[in-house]
Amino acid sequence: MKIFNNKKDLKDCLLEYKRNKKTIGFVPTMGALHEGHLSLIEKAAQKNEIVVVSIFVNPTQFDNVEDLKKYPKTIENDIKLLTSVSCDILFSPSVEEIYSANIISEKFDFDGLEHQMEGKFRDGHFDGVGTVVKTLFEIVEPNKAYFGQKDFQQLQIIKKMVEKHHLKVKIKGCPIYREEDGLAMSSRNTRLSTEHREIAPFIHKTLRKVQKKFSTKSISEINKWLENQFKKQPLLKLEYFTIADEKTLKTAKNKESNKQYRAFIAVFAGEIRLIDNIRLKN
Ligand code: PAF
């Protein structure tokens, strides 16, 4: 595996592959890699000749300085993991390499997708994500890029950015990877206390129950039921739960037969914010 910290060297190397008509699959990450990331890398390797992974903890997408400071950094272990899978190139730039002296986000219009859910609770988050992902796409110029559906809103927003900015890359959403007990894999899981880690699978279990209820109960009944479930769980604090249209991400009040819905949730387990979602069938 080749490792680059500098975009010029990376671009020179990629140019050679592109000249030889090799297809490039890209997996952008913030490091602290887990099996969820590795599954994205394997997907990229199945469909492309060269796989590029980036590790960059992007400061502009954090609305909370403490969260940024405490974001797990495990580069040595990440490199070990990457060499054990089909990663050809790791790009691990510094903040200066990506932002020069101006660590600020570009302002994006994602047709309202950015104002829902995470956008309401994490100020400027999606401008930060858009800025870094667009910059990374401009550097790597991949044929395809792979994102997990755990961050479903992020996935839809990146698809929208690609469409609006006429970028050539194809965006591939991949299923949520879960621990055996159902907890969605996340780099933040390593920061959970033992008692919070034990209770955290409750989030997915409750979403599974929502999935069952969706065919027989109204959305308002489900919302009330879910709130009550979390009231009985003192270790978990519900930030939001919403059933939304997958396309617009707007909260649904009533079910319409021609729409595809998904349930989205954000929960604090102590200081750690966990998100998850599940597809619903009418
Ligand atoms: O999902 C993530 O890890 C990040 O938001 C991403 C897409 C790598 C951008 O920093």
Image: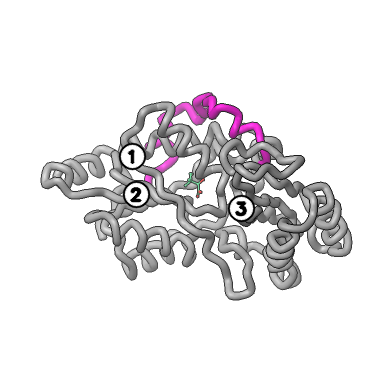
Q: Position of residue 37 (x, y in %)?
A: 45, 60
Residue type marked 2: Phe
Q: Which residue is mark 3?
A: 70
Q: Main secondary structure of the magenta part?
A: loop
Q: Nearer the viewer, residue 242 or 86?
A: 242
Residue type marked 1: Val
**Of helix, strand and loop, which one carries label 2?**
strand
Position above or below: 218 against 1: above
3 or 2: tag closer to the N-terminus: 2
Observer able to see residue 72: yes
Q: Residue furthest front?
A: 257
**Of helix, strand and loop, which one carries label 1?**
loop
User: Alpha carbon of mark 3 to alpha carbon of mark 2: how far?
Assistant: 26 Å
Question: Cβ of disc 2 within 8 Å of ligand 1?
Answer: no
Marker disc for residue 85? none
Q: Residues within 10 Å of mark 1 (few under 14, many from 20)?
A: some
Q: Magenta stretch?
A: 92-117
153 drawn magenta: no
Q: Residue at x 73, y 64 (%)?
A: 209
**Of helix, strand and loop, which one carries label 3?**
helix
Pointers 1 and 3 in contact (C-beta within 8 Å): no
Pointers 2 and 1 in contact (C-beta within 8 Å): yes
Q: Nearer the viewer, residue 208 or 109?
A: 208
Q: Which quarter of the picture shows residue 64?
A: top right
Q: Position of residue 85 (x, y in %)?
A: 33, 67
* Display colour scheme: one colour
Q: Which residue is mark 2?
A: 26
Residue type marked 3: Lys
